[in-house]
Amino acid sequence: MENSSQTLPPSSPSCPTTTTFGGSLPFSSSPQQTCSSNRISLPLSPISFPPSPTSLSPATAESIHSSSPLSHCTASLCLEGQNVQCLSPANLSDQDDLTCLSWLHQRGNLLPLQPLPKMTPLPQLEFSTPSQPLPPASSKPPYSFSSLIFMAIEDSPDKRLPVKDIYEWIVNNFPYYRTASGGWRNSVRHNLSLSKSFCRIQRDKSQSVGKGSLWCVCPEYRPALLEVLRKTHSYHSTNNNLMNKPALLEGADYGVPAVCDSMEISDLSHTLLLSSPQTLTTDNPTFGENPPCPLTPDHEELVTMESVEYQQEEVCEEMEKDPLSDSGYIELHYYQSHQYQYLVLPGDTELDLETVEILQLDAEAQEAAGSLLDLAGGGY
DNA sequence: TAACGGATAAACATGG
DNA sequence: CCCATGTTTATCCGTT
């Protein structure tokens, strides 16, 4: 991301704008982020890192700083290391089963909008009555197997699925595969094994039901997967006019899963997709042979906007400018430098941070998080 | 034309 | 032994 070069680790003199307020200021009382324009008001979702509910008490919020003109609104969120032990892999306890984004759902009720029952057909089916026959499954979906797997995993409450459930998700959402020969399953397994985007997790033996491991999306590759998915969806939405017309209603040969519609910014759900740094460490015992992806210094995360007030035309304008803006995500860059953790909003994010509120940074924030699917619903 | 990515097929190993 | 799962290799095809 080009923004990476704009947001250097603030420990260095190159980040002179970072201001530390000391240890007494919780995010709930954080100062308003002010920029020079009112394009978009963005109350950020409460941000917290997993895993321990106590790991990020209000005392963990140490400093917030933001500054920049409109086109360079940059907010740095600095967490003093001594209060964010959870961010240190060394402090992980065995019970902190942090794998990818699963922590988002560990506290329950993390799907504030309309959590979908597991393996429920995607919301696209909302447009068809139960009596309607499924569309002909003659055409192959435009999505690669990696995208299909990605969508399946993202659609799961725990952001992890056994391969069997991945099969099931694909079959449920893409009728083509109901009648396709079994070779595609081989392809799914092949992709899981070969792609670096997916991590295999050993099942919890105590509650192991079924064979095999669980698969999750490697957080480091999530942006790329999202981008591929977005491009594919965008391309076919444009060409097939699927953006405004549900595939099933149009009799399309393949459905567009709700996950794809999470690419739409028009849905303003409460979703927080900050993966935890410790899930990226090799210390995590829950990973199997496939080690988790290493945490890069400028590890990119995606955070959706919550309760964004906007004008529609402005959103459309932004969609053209930022490939990910229409995904409903704000790109964050994660830094760890010395005793601080930094989350940096991209400099070119056209967000007016005037009314941004960084809310209390504790475990309750996780309740504001949801799955990608929660973003669906406004896309059609 | 070569390089690349993705899809497909197949062989093989492992474990329930 | 059967089957599901996981890994690896090879090949083909379309795109760039």
Image: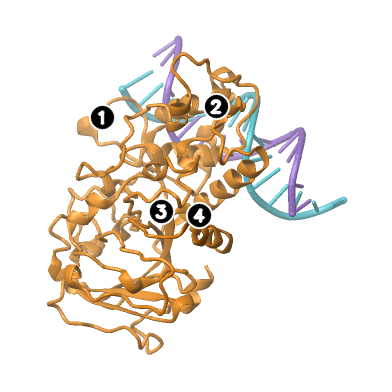
Chain colours: A orange, B cyan, C purple
Q: Is residue A196 left or right of residue A33?
A: right
Measured in 3D between alpha carbons, the distance from the residue under mark 1 to the one under mark 4, in whole angstroms, is 38 Å
Q: Amino acid at mark 3?
A: Pro
Q: Are marks 1 and 4 in contact (CB under 8 Å)?
A: no
- Tell me which residue sits at (57%, 43%) in the image: A233
**Disc number at residue A326?**
4
Residue A163 in which image quadrant? top left
| Nearest the eye: A37 or A218 | A37
Q: Is residue A327 left or right of residue A273?
A: right
Secondary structure of the residue carrying tag 4 is helix
Measured in 3D between alpha carbons, the distance from the residue under mark 3 to the one under mark 4, in whole angstroms, is 20 Å
Q: Amino acid at mark 1?
A: Ser
Secondary structure of the residue carrying tag 3 is helix
Q: Position of residue A275 (x, y in %)?
A: 34, 56
Q: Nearer the viewer, mark 2 or mark 1?
A: 2
Work out whether disc 3 and disc 1 sit on a shared chain: yes
Q: Which residue is mark 1?
A: A208
